[in-house]
Image (cartoon, rainbow, N blue to C red):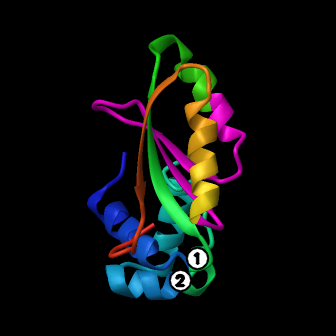
Amino acid sequence: MTTAKDEDLLALLRLNAREPVAALARKLGVSRTTVQDRLKRLEGNGTIAGYAVKLGSASTAAGVSAFISLGVEPKRQADVARALTLIPQVEALYAISGKLDFMALVRAGTAEAIDRLIDRMTAMPGVVDVETAVILSTKVDRR
């Protein structure tokens, strides 16, 4: 269970996970030790699963990203999810509510490579519907 201060700390970390503990403490109005203890607890209980590098636009500009949504036969969902995790271009896979079952965030070097990826996904046993939305630009990304 997270507190309001924990949520404030998590919000600051989403903006800059490399923010020094002393700066976080100042912004939160608590001691450095309190922030360290909260971080240790949040890491220990799985709220914070890790820290990652967020690539800048210069690095991500060389490629095409898209959301590919998939409709899957109910008894084949586990098989399709497993197969999708083996595709290196799949950066994230989400189970979603609504008309379709999964949404994959994919990145490839070219639009043609995205097209081949869509063909590959469409050919998977159990996939019955595919919708694609190519990402044109990012307006906000707080990950």
Answer yes or no: is residue 50 visible: no
Question: Where does label 2 land, which residue?
Answer: 57
Left or right, 131 with reference to 56: left
Question: Where does label 1 land, which residue?
Answer: 60
Instruction: Give the magenta part as a residue range.
Output: 82-110
Name the mark on residue 76: none
**Image spot of residue 85 (x, y percent):** 66, 39
Bin the neighbour count of mark 1 within 10 Å (Cα to Cα): few under 14, some 14-19, many 20 and up: few
Q: Quadrant of the C terminus?
A: bottom left
Q: Quadrant of the N terminus?
A: top left
Q: What residue do we see at 55% from left, 33% from top?
A: 122
Q: Is residue 42 above or below residue 34?
A: above
Q: What residue do we see at 37% from left, 78% from top?
A: 30
Residue 103 is inside the magenta segment: yes
**Image spot of residue 38 (x, y percent):** 47, 63
Q: What residue do we see at 51% from left, 74% from top?
A: 33
Q: Is residue 15 above or below residue 83?
A: below
